[in-house]
Image (cartoon, rainbow, N blue to C red):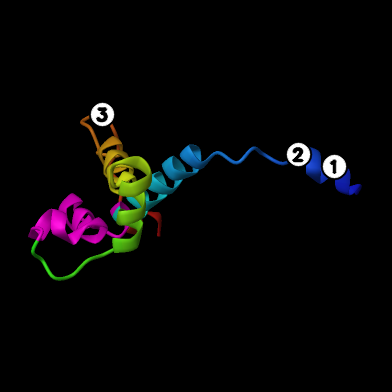
Amino acid sequence: MDSAFFVEQRFAWDEDRRALLCADLDAFYARAYGLTRDELRYILDSADVKGADYPSKTFRVLKEKEIRNYGEYRTRRLVLEAWDRMEPTANSPRWRCDDAR
């Protein structure tokens, strides 16, 4: 095939869309592994669950970068919003990772 074909078929990079897709995947896998929302909150930002004085920090560099660039810890917000969107309702089927076996 002509290499021009591949150049014309490239998609436009969209950082905001990528962040949303990554957040959806993070929330999906957290649910698939059986985490609770609070456990996911702890993974994303232990100080959010344990308090600002908690000595352990997860994703410290990412959090600082996003606060500097976006004025918020965007990944945390997006992942928890995705988690909430995936919350089963009375009309939605319940699923678990081991249901697929």
Q: Is residue 48 left or right of residue 69?
A: left
Q: Which residue carries the number 1 mark? A: 5
Give the overall secondary structure of the magenta segment: helix
The answer to whether the residue labelled 3 contacts the one labelled 2, judged by CB atoms less than 8 Å apart, is no
Q: Nearer the viewer, residue 23 or 60?
A: 60
| Quadrant that contains the C terminus | bottom left
Crowdedness near tag 1: few (<14), some (14–19) or many (≥20) residues, C-alpha within 10 Å: few
The residue pinned by badge 2 equals 9
- In this view, the mark in front (1 or 3): 1
Give the magenta range.
31-52
Q: Residue at x 87, y 43 (%)?
A: 4
**What amino acid type is highlighted by mark number 2?**
Gln
Q: Which residue is mark 3?
A: 91
Answer yes or no: do the residues labelled 2 and 1 have beta carbons within 8 Å? yes
Please say whether residue 28 is visible from this viewpoint: yes
Q: Earlier in the sequence, mark 3 or mark 2?
A: 2
The residue under the point 29% across, 62% down is 60
Residue 99 appearing in the image: no
Identify which residue is drawn at 38% across, 45% down.
69
Residue 18: percent from the left, percent from the top?
49, 43
